[in-house]
Amino acid sequence: MQANKELARIFGQIAAALELLEANRFRINAHTRVARILKDMTEDIAQVVAEEPSTAIKRLTKMPGIGKATAEKIVEFLEHGTVTEHQELLQQVPSGVFDLLEIPGIGPKAAQAMWKELGITGVAELKDRLDSPELQALPRMGKKTIENIRQAIAFSEQTQNRIPLGLALPMAEQMVDALRQVPGVVKAEYAGSLRRGRETIGDLDFLVAADDPEAVRQRFTTDPAVTQVLARGDTKCSVRLSIFNVAIQADLRLVPEASYGAALMYFTGSKEHNVRLREIAIKQNKRLNEYGLFAGTEERPQDRQSSPLAVEEAAIYESLGLPFIEPERREDRGELDKLDEATSPLIQLSDIRSELHSHTTASDGKLSIEEMAQAAKERGYHSLAITDHSQSQVIANGLAPDRLRRHIEAIREADQRLDGITLLAGSEVDILIDGRLDYDDDLLAELDIVVASPHASLRQDPTTATQRLLAAIRHPLVHIIGHPTGRIINRREGLSPDMNALFEAAVEHDTVLELNANWNRLDLRDTHLRAALDKGCKIAINTDAHRDAQLDFMTYGILTARRAGMPPEACINTWAAEKLHSWLRSKR
Ligand code: DGT
Ligand code: CA
Ligand code: CA
Ligand code: ZN
């Protein structure tokens, strides 16, 4: 049914373009009607045509509302993936003008007036001119209408958030796998902020070198996740994807195999890192662009053909006299200024040997102690800490002291039974509003590991929040501060304590700070972590798993840690069993 949806969108866009271009009303309406028919149709139109292509047009015209011209366009689309009339119209209307139509309150007449009379060709431009007298002077553009438009833009800015890493990465990996299976594809990767491991992704960027670009365009634009094809050019296609009902744009760039490495570098960014690299090149009388690194600073159109000094990422850095800089570090946050720091070894997933924050059915987890242990064992971990919620977490079925005592027994029994993994009896104990912990010290002392986390009152003022967290850091029985700020990406700001004060106290009291690897949290965030590492803090990367698959959130923690320049040894989850267990005991 993908073809129906895509055709409906094309016909809808033809209608909108015709309207913007003030075409004949009947022609506009005919296309609008076809778009609606296609959307409502329950038969797969691709199937209707595929059965007997020679008579497809005849059979299509028998369907209600479909005339000969429409049938021809449908067949053209199914054969070529595009409709000529649609492509021609897209040439005449800037794509941003279609975006104007998406704003509630802006109809074709208004969009057309904004475009033709004021030269506004996108939402950003419109936003800049909301207060201008010439906008108000347009027909039917009263103060009230403009206010409604302002609110609609603000709302769409809020809801069209950058999407979290944890939604973007699986989607992108799936797409790359699909693209690699297209015959003739030589190389395919994702680039952009996703390759740099940012916590949120504005849009996805795919890069492909292929012998048969059309097959790649076809695969990309007809992926089941595609809800809209925004552009379909020779070297660039843009689509809108839907991932669990979250929309994100994805760009595909088809690049020559000969310049693939340079293109990968260019489209990985960040833009700021690239700008710095180009400046460095120019100082060496070279020039760097998406085709390669070349001698001489003067850009020439034949760069596509001329022979570069270097094309592959590693070779480009080397030719510039720079060490290879990992994608996660390419943010112009000092990686090109302090080169020895930029080459320090970064932690990787295979370094992780334990999970120190997890939940079971005793509180709000989905698996038993044994099942979680099995899942951790499968990942090759030597230790798993079971850290269910404490008594204040009523909704999460937090454990009252007597229940916790029985739970500790159960964990120890399971540990006796199981080979190949050490189970640590722990708790994720609430840091109460005033910094006290949710259990008495006697009980805490019985635990192998204490993760203390803030859950309630996350809108506290910074001074109170700092005191609250400092109290937990200073507590002699606390090993790890879990998700220290309590932020939820795109949803909750969390606490804003004096981070440096926390880091200093953490070093002084040998308390570890967590990087919670759940992609909704990633807390501490990359910039915090980096400052913490600079101060000498130890870090735990924990998934806070509530079910088996969540143990794999570790991937997002690792990406975030690498952005912070974390070396393996700074992360206690990389430590061998003996070292880890003896450190845990040092707090008992
Ligand atoms: P995003 O999508 O907002 O999460 O962030 P990026 O970094 O993926 O940005 P995007 O998608 O606009 O562009 C992808 C990469 O392409 C970017 O990281 C660097 C490169 N790029 C894009 N535009 C420019 C530009 O104007 N100059 C330079 N030097 N690089 C650019
Ligand atoms: Ca991007
Ligand atoms: Ca992009
Ligand atoms: Zn937890």
Image: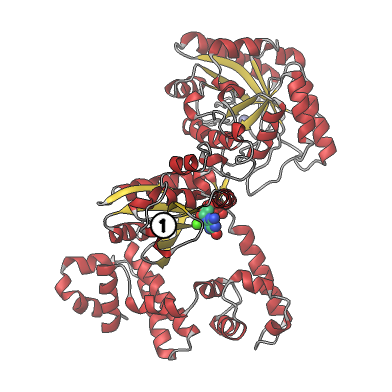
Q: Nearer the viewer, residue 358 or 538?
A: 538
Q: Is 516 rendered above or below residue 8?
A: above
- Judging from the image, what secondary structure is the residue with disc 1 in? strand
Residue 442 % position (x, y):
75, 12
Dot 1 corresponds to which residue?
252
Is there any visible trace of residue 437 in the rendered image? no
Residue 240, image x, y percentages: 46, 60
Q: In the rendered image, which quarter is residue 424 located in?
A: top right
From the viewer's perspective, tell me whether residue 398 is left or right of residue 319. Answer: right
Q: Residue 221, relative to residue 118: is it above or below?
A: above
Display colour scheme: secondary structure
The amino acid type found where label 1 is placed reads Leu
Residue nearest the viewer, comparing 404 with 158: 158
- Say whether residue 95 is left or right of residue 64: right
Q: Residue furthest right?
A: 463
Identity of the residue drawn at 73% across and 80% down: 143
Quarter of the figure that contains the C terminus: top right
Residue at (58, 51) in percent of width and height: 279
Q: Closer to the camera, 334 or 393?
A: 334
* Residue 214 pos. (x, y %): 29, 61
| 478 is higher (above) or lower (below) than 122 | above
Looking at this view, is 398 or 133 the one in front? Answer: 133
In what quadrant of the picture does the N terminus appear? bottom left
Classify residue 255 by image quadrant.
bottom left
Residue 441 seen in the figure: yes
Q: Choose top left, top right, bottom left or bottom right for residue 5.
A: bottom left
